[in-house]
Amino acid sequence: MRLVRWLVLVAGLSFAALPLLWMGLSSLKSREDAIRPHLNFVPALGAPADPHSFEFEATGTAYAHLSEVHAGAQASFWSHLWSSVVIGVLSTLASVALGTACALGFSRLEIRAAKDWLFFVLSTRFMPPLAVVVPVLLMYRTLDLQGTHLGLALLYTVFNLSLATWLMKGFLDEIPRAYEEAALVDGYTRAQALWRVVLPEARTGIAVTAVFCLISAWNEYGFAMTLNSSGAVTVPAYFAGLQGNIEGMPWPQIAAGALLFVAPIVVFTWLARAHLLRGITFGTVKQ
């Protein structure tokens, strides 16, 4: 059984890693080799072998070209990656902070019609975000937030707030109130008890919520393409804009940029892996 389990895990990991492996190989090829319809590992029957079928570009060539400003773009890949980092980090911090504050209120305070309010918070995710893109666009033009890091960070915060509130409430409900009561008996104020006792116990939920909020903001495309057609353009919108390149899509550079774009999420998730694994089973076993 153990061998079967490992075989299934290896097969699943290989299947999931195949797109990343393909992008890694494409980032090392020339554009002509990257867009070939077949791998050319074996020449077609009766066709001469292509001596350049297995040649890769000089090491790091595609990555070096990421500093160039391609046709259809306003800046280099690194500038757009910085915009994604700023917007993603700001929206994640704001979503987690506000979501935790809301969840503390619902979890620790007696709120009239709390279940109705929680359902209302959840209902904000029922409607597709692009359904409100026109009024949001008009509002952002009025407030002069179009094409700014702050504008997109605020918008992502609003859409991730319901997710953060529900996730954090589930974790906070599992923390016994006796912890706070003991802190109050020791002379702590309620704010000190929450800050020094409850929040450290909720770090697992905070890590899980931060990962989901960051992934949501990091990969969002619709609003990024609509609201930030100029200025603070994120990487997904940058890749879409390269379709206007008169020389064709620079696929090796796109593959290299996509790998670098995925790397921060992979690193952040790896750093939070212990909390993520604990968060999956948090509250399933009653003490």
Image (cartoon, rainbow, N blue to C red):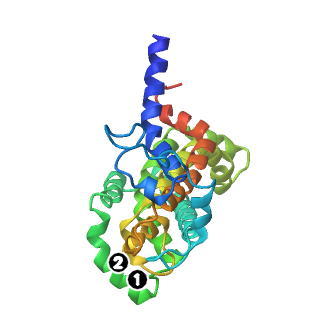
Q: Specify few, some or many for label 2: CA neighbours under 10 Å numbering under 14, 14-19, or 20 or more.
A: some
Which kind of residue does numbered mark 1 sit on?
Tyr
Q: Position of residue 169 (x, y in %)?
A: 46, 48
Residue at left 30%, top 79%? 135
Quarter-wise, where is residue 181 in the image?
Answer: top right
Left or right, 38 with reference to 178: left
Given residues 7 and 114, the one toward you in this image is: 7
221 above or below 14? Answer: below
Residue at the extreme right of the image, as rendered: 186
Badge 1 element? helix
Q: What number is the disc on residue 140? A: 1
Given residues 219 and 262, the one toward you in this image is: 262
Q: Position of residue 243 (x, y in %)?
A: 38, 70
Given residues 37 and 67, the one toward you in this image is: 37
113 above or below 91? Answer: above
Which kind of residue does numbered mark 2 sit on?
Val
Badge 2 element? helix
Q: CA distance from mark 1 to mark 2?
A: 6 Å
- The quadrant in which the N terminus is found is top left
Q: Position of residue 69 (x, y in %)?
A: 54, 75
Residue 216 visible, this angle: no
- The quadrant in which the C terminus is found is top right
Residue at left 60%, top 60%? 61
Residue corresponding to mark 2? 136
Q: Are marks 1 and 2 in contact (CB under 8 Å)?
A: yes
